[in-house]
Amino acid sequence: MTTETPGRFPWGLTIVCALAFALLCSLGIWQVQRMQWKGDLIADAEAAATHPPVPVMQVYRPDQEFRSVMIDCPGLATAPFVEMRTVENGQVGVRLISACALPSKPFVTLVDRGFVSETVSARPPVTPSTEPVRIIGQLRMPPEPSSFAPPPEGNVFYARDHLAMGRALGVKKWLASPMIYATTSSNPEWLALRPSAPPAAFSNNHLGYALTWFGLALAVLGFYIVLLRRTLLKQPRSASGATGKEEDS
């Protein structure tokens, strides 16, 4: 005959597993909320990009990112520029970036004039001019430069370092944060320049993260149930064996 001896309830194990389970579930819920927020952000960006262009000063604010705007930049066609090394549609090249004074404001914004393939060695002329050039573009907040990017070499940059580009262009006034990606050319006669606004760099991987956290929470729950059963139900003892030992003695 065998019997099972109940063990003491594992309060310490229960508390630890309960805290771990609650933490993992809260992280999963947070990722679900992030997923909903990111979905709304992507939808807002796509909707903003479809609006007709408006004068830049009507919407020149960080919360109006991705809006289509029009701006008259004095001398933009022959303005000084810096180059940012990049890859676009699998093609290596540079993007030309110049400064543009905002109308009626003591601020300057940067204008990304477009992409030029590395197979093209020519560049637009750089001469002083005040002739206004009207462009249509898209408002964007400059990304934080990567710490892994090489430092700039003269006027050639390897990351979109907003402030450093402004200094290289000799910006003396305040440099405003939103920049403009031109979608019409500042030099329409020069076909090598391809104005464009890159796709929004959004990634919505939060569902995968949420499933990971919830999966870990279930694993903790399963681990706790197994250990609880083993703790409460200790190894069976043989009642007959115990009796036999008593008789021998």
Image (cartoon, rainbow, N blue to C red):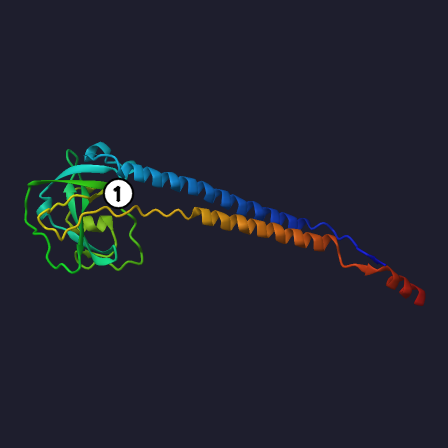
Q: Is residue 110 visible?
A: yes
Residue 33 placement (x, y as % from top left): 45, 40
Please identify the quarter of the rendering in which residue 58 is found. Answer: top left
Q: Residue furthest bottom?
A: 248
Q: Left or right of 6: which side holds 67?
A: left
Between 55 and 53, the one nearer to me in the picture: 53
The quadrant the C terminus occupies is: bottom right
Residue 8 placement (x, y as % from top left): 74, 51
Q: Left or right of 216: which side holds 90?
A: left
Residue depicted at x 89% and y 65%: 245
The quadrant the N terminus occupies is: bottom right
| Three-letter code for the amino acid on which mark 1 is drawn | Arg
Residue depicted at x 22% and y 34%: 52
Residue 206 placement (x, y as % from top left): 43, 47
Residue depicted at x 19% and y 42%: 109
- Mark 1: secondary structure: strand
Residue 91 placement (x, y as % from top left): 23, 58
Residue depicted at x 13% and y 53%: 192
Between 126 and 122, the one nearer to me in the picture: 122
Crowd rating for badge 1 (residues with CA inside 10 Å; few <14, some 14–19, many 20+)? many
Position of 147 relative to 186 (above/below): below
Position of 105 relative to 165 (above/below): above
Number of numbered discs present? 1
Q: Is residue 172 visible?
A: no
In the picture of the structure, the residue carrying the numbered disc 1 is 140
Q: Left or right of 128: which side holds 230?
A: right
